[in-house]
Image (cartoon, rainbow, N blue to C red):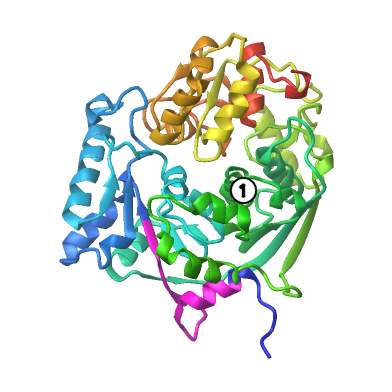
Amino acid sequence: MTHPRTMFAKIWEAHEILRHPSGPSLLYIDRDMIHEGSFHAFADLKRRGLKPRRPGQVFGIADHYVPTTGRSAAEAASPAIARMIDTFDENMDWGGVRHFSLSSRQQGIVHVVAPEQGITLPGLTIVCSDSHTSTQGALGAIAFGIGQSENAHVLATQTLWQTRPKTMRVTVDGALGQGVSAKDVMLALIAQIGAGGAGGHAIEFAGSVVRNLSIEGRLTLCNMSIEAAARLGMVAPDETTFTYIRGRHYAPSEQEWDSALDQWRRLPTDEGAVFDREVTLDGAAIAPMVTWGTSPEDALPITGRVPDPASFASADKRAAAARALDYMGLTPGTALEGLAIDKVFIGSCTNARIEDLRAAAAVLKGRKAVVPAIIVPGSTPVRDQAEAEGIAQVFRDAGFDWRQSGCSMCAAMNGDVVGPGERCASTSNRNFVGRQGPGARTHLVSPAMAAAAAISGKLTDVRRI
């Protein structure tokens, strides 16, 4: 009789080729997604006289450095960046890898494009040289970020040595209130367990709140699992998943569909399976969240106040909070609601899908931004859909700068930056020192909260709007 297994165990064990006596497993990798930073891996292959072993399972997408004001490398922030984009295209052609260049109508952020195109499927192992590869786990896959030396190994062998992580189940039950989104759920979770709270674990998200989320909401959960130091995040595939996948470009054909569905239905965690750790949240108790410091764990409800460093239990936490407040230019006791901001950014692999844009547009309709604000769709198809639905015009009418797809101000690698000392309400996933530019002060929020900040010029409880 077989023991009950977690979804993670089922997928891991199905891909485990062998296990080294010291512990690590050699895994077969189904998908390797690469972006323009991959030139290191390709240089390694060329030096060794190797080529991609299975180029049909590799997908290249330029996103981190691409300009958002135009669609050519010539419009990049610098000649060096333009050369990096051109080199990416050259490497894709050399390796026989299908890729989405700037001129492609499918181009976008890799973690938006992959599920959107049906590249991401339940039960797969997926890697990419970007930590937020965990996003893909929302469809029931094992997906994680790797370095460029590991990327070269995958390109050459379609395998990778990995140490098996522990498992954690995060159960969110109840119902989310008005104005509360998946982004708020993740900020609440990270505030509860800490930025290192899931270290060494693969998270499976479960519970009624998760089951009721759209795929886009689930993608946000898994995307930010990395901000709790998890190795990856996952959500069990269900009817919502299957409906989302069916008919997408790289999804199973109609002739293959029933067979694929039969396999996918076996993936969810068996009743009675044991996780190494269990965490629970009450969805009804979660409010719209905002970060006040320089870590995603520095998050509070918008109704909260900046904490006093002296209130933290450990000396390390007290010191970290004091440094964060100094960098952020905040004083203890300051109300978060009403804090003036200088800029708004809506975009990133966390919150730049069509559902995110709809949420922002619902707040902005008939209103005007009073601070500079840019909105960067997660892909060209998302941009096209926003145009077709009239959402893009809402952004233009509100005074937003409506850009082309790319990572943009999330990583500040392509010329889209927050100025020194400027305070930005951002839908991205990281608020580290200098993340959005030298001296930039980032407050992580949901798309609706970012829109509310744009029209008020300050952090605002979107429930009031």
Residue 179 coordinates in the image, percent (x, y)? 73, 30
Residue at image position (44%, 20%) is 402
Q: How many marks?
A: 1
Can you identify the residue that label 1 sits on?
A: 218
Q: Is residue 19 magenta?
A: yes
Q: In screen coordinates, is 124 left or right of 337? A: left
Q: Is residue 443 visible?
A: no
* 10 Å crowding of disc 1: few (<14), some (14-19), many (20+): many
Vertical comparison of 133 with 10: above or below = above
Q: Which residues are magenta?
A: 9-32
Outermost residue on the bottom side: it is: 1
Residue at image position (79%, 39%) is 286
From the viewer's side, name the closer residue of 432 and 184: 184
Quadrant location, the C terminus? top right
Residue 27 coordinates in the image, percent (x, y)? 44, 73
Residue 84 coordinates in the image, percent (x, y)? 25, 39
Residue at image position (39%, 33%) is 380
* Residue 186 placement: quadrant: top right
Q: Is residue 75 visible?
A: yes
From the viewer's side, name the closer residue of 151 and 387: 387
